[in-house]
């Protein structure tokens, strides 16, 4: 009880100082952002009608003009804008099973436990102790004076008063037992706020870990959607190649019949066969890319590479890009982009660490004490006469450290300056990502429009070349060239459709969408 009162009294004396926190107070950085997106434009050219060989529609028909609006961006479930149930399923599986996401979630828990460890230094530490010692004093050592004090008659074999465990009536024995039990307590008073600054830094580190997990999630969702779109693009390219291959084989068979009838030449047959072989050679690389995309999607969902083959192997249309995307304002990126938010939290942590370093220049105040029982006999260890206690206020004043303390302050100031520059860089990178995605999306639509026109023109050219060849008015090489040009145009059109949808994914990712999909632990 006495120990508690003494510690409380000292704490009361130092209480007026405990509100002090040295070092700079953190203020969120003031960031100047553009008023509008430079590459958004009021309206982008309308979506083209996409036609493939034979007039088959791809599912991306004429749509209203795409435009970016300044309405707040709806980013939480952006992938649902594609209206693809399989993509929705893959996104859900990746959120539930991705291993990188699990690592990021574990890192959040790590940061929270580290904060608990740091915050524990604000409170007293206490420990229960118990010990037993069997001692023997030497006659020529420290025990000699004790023996003399307890054996003034000069008898030999004396020991500590009340500590005899041996002896034969000639005095105290130099051997004795010592039993002790009690409590030790220590408390470093956070007078200048060094510990509280460390807690601030730990809090900011938790926020940084949370934003890091969100950034991992944004990247994961973007990666799943990009690979899914690419998979459907590969599958559509394979289908186009197979359609053209079938047409070219029919042309080869017809040319062979014409040769047998004396109408065509061996050169015509050889050219038709070469075109069939060239088209066949394009299919295997596409099949390889498609299978690899399936394998990667399996791993992204936290499963083995072959787990999604049954689900994804059947051909499906390329997810269609939405006609309108609310962009919001550039300033919204400061709250939407997880990497920007993470950089801000890292800056807050670095600022608090300067305060931790500054506090080391000032005196440190500690309270130490113990309360317990001490006796040379176990049977009376807990009696009132065995009570022992001590209280020890301590002050430590740094005098000379060879410049290490001030160098430590300059070190953390430099780290804070790096974090400030990293935050500014993260903001600029976020703006660049969005502008890049906007211009890519706008230009890809125009590219797709031109490719649609090219496909339509090549379809007419092929039909006319066949007609003229049948009438004997043109060379067979013109038919083969028309077939090859149509195949190239159709393949480019599909790749452009895939690129347009991936540009949408990239835009949503650049806006910072998707991290709201997971509730924080």
Image (tube, helix red, strand yellow):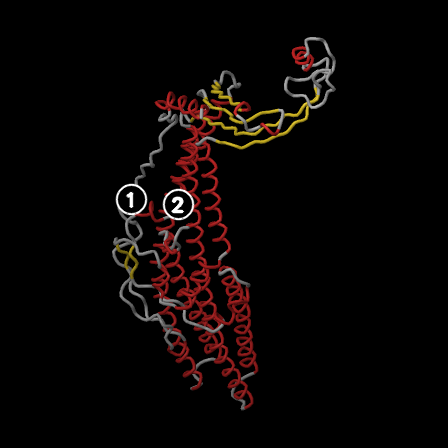
Query: Which percent across, then down, holds residue 520?
Result: 40, 51
Q: Nearer the viewer, residue 69 or 242?
A: 69
* In-image side of 242 versus 25 (left or right): right
Relative height, residue 198 to residue 168 (above, below)? below
Query: Which percent across, then down, holds residue 11?
Result: 40, 24
Specify the quadrant that holds the N terminus. top left
Residue at screen point 55% across, 67% down: 306
Residue at screen point 53% across, 85% down: 253
Q: Nearer the viewer, residue 191 or 111?
A: 191
Q: Residues within 10 Å of mark 1 (few under 14, many from 20)?
A: few
Question: Circle 1 is placed at which residue position?
Answer: 34
Q: Quadrant of residue 454?
A: bottom left
Circle 1: element type: loop
Question: Circle 2 is placed at which residue position?
Answer: 429
Relative height, residue 442 to residue 476 (above, below)? above
Q: Quadrant of residue 277?
A: bottom right
Q: How many marks?
A: 2
Circle 2: element type: helix
Q: Residues within 10 Å of mark 2 (few under 14, many from 20)?
A: some
Query: Which percent across, then down, holds residue 420?
Result: 40, 35
1 or 2: tag closer to the N-terminus: 1
Q: What whole-number distance in Å separates the C-alpha atoms at marks 1 and 2?
A: 13 Å
Residue at screen point 49% across, 18% down: 398
Relative height, residue 50 to residue 466 (above, below)? above
In the image, farthest residue toward the top: 153
């Amino acid at each position: 009880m006495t120990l508690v009162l003494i510690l409380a009294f000292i704490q009361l004396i130092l209480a007026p100082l405990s509100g002090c926190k040295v070092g700079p107070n953190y203020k969120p950085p003031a960031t100047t952002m553009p008023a509008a997106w430079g590459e958004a434009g009021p309206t982008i050219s309308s979506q083209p009608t996409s036609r493939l060989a034979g007039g088959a529609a791809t599912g991306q028909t004429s749509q209203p003009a795409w435009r970016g609006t300044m309405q707040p961006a709806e980013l939480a479930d952006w992938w649902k804008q594609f209206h693809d149930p399989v993509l929705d399923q893959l996104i859900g599986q990746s959120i539930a099973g991705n291993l990188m996401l699990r690592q990021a979630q574990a890192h959040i828990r790590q940061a929270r436990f580290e904060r608990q460890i740091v915050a524990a230094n604000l409170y007293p530490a206490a420990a229960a102790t118990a010990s037993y010692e069997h001692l023997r004093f030497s006659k020529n050592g420290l025990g000699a004076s004790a023996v003399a004090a307890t054996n003034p008659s000069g008898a030999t074999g004396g020991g500590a008063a009340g500590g005899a465990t041996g002896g034969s009536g000639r005095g105290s024995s130099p051997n004795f037992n010592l039993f002790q039990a009690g409590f030790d307590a220590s408390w470093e008073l956070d007078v200048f706020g060094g510990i509280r600054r460390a807690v601030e830094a730990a809090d900011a580190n938790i926020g940084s870990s949370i934003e890091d997990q969100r950034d991992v999630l944004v990247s994961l969702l973007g990666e799943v959607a990009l690979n899914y779109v690419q998979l459907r693009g590969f599958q559509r390219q394979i289908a186009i190649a197979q359609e053209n291959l079938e047409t070219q084989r029919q042309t080869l068979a017809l040319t062979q019949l014409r040769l047998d009838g004396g109408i065509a030449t061996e050169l015509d047959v050889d050219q038709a066969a070469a075109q069939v072989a060239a088209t066949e050679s394009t299919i295997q690389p596409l099949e390889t890319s498609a299978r690899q995309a399936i394998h990667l999607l399996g791993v992204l969902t936290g499963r083995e590479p072959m787990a999604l083959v049954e689900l994804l192997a059947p051909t499906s249309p390329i997810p269609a890009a939405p006609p309108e995307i609310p962009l919001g304002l550039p300033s919204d990126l400061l709250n939407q982009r997880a990497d920007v938010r993470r950089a801000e939290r890292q800056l807050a942590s670095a600022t608090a660490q300067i305060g931790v370093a500054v506090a080391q220049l000032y005196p440190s105040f500690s309270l130490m004490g113990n309360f317990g029982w001490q006796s040379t006999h176990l049977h009376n260890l807990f009696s009132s006469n065995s009570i022992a206690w001590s209280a020890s206020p301590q002050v430590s004043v740094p005098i000379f450290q060879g410049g290490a303390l001030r160098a430590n302050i300059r070190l953390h100031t430099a780290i804070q300056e790096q974090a400030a520059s990293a935050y500014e860089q993260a903001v600029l990178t976020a703006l660049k990502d969005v502008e890049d995605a906007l211009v890519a999306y706008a230009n890809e639509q125009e590219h797709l429009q031109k490719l649609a026109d090219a496909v339509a023109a090549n379809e007419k050219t092929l039909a006319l070349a066949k007609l003229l060849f049948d009438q004997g008015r043109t060379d067979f090489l013109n038919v083969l060239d028309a077939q090859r040009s149509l195949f190239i145009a159709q393949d480019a059109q599909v790749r452009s459709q895939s690129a347009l949808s991936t540009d949408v994914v990239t835009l949503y990712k650049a806006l910072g969408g998707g991290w709201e999909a997971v509730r924080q632990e």
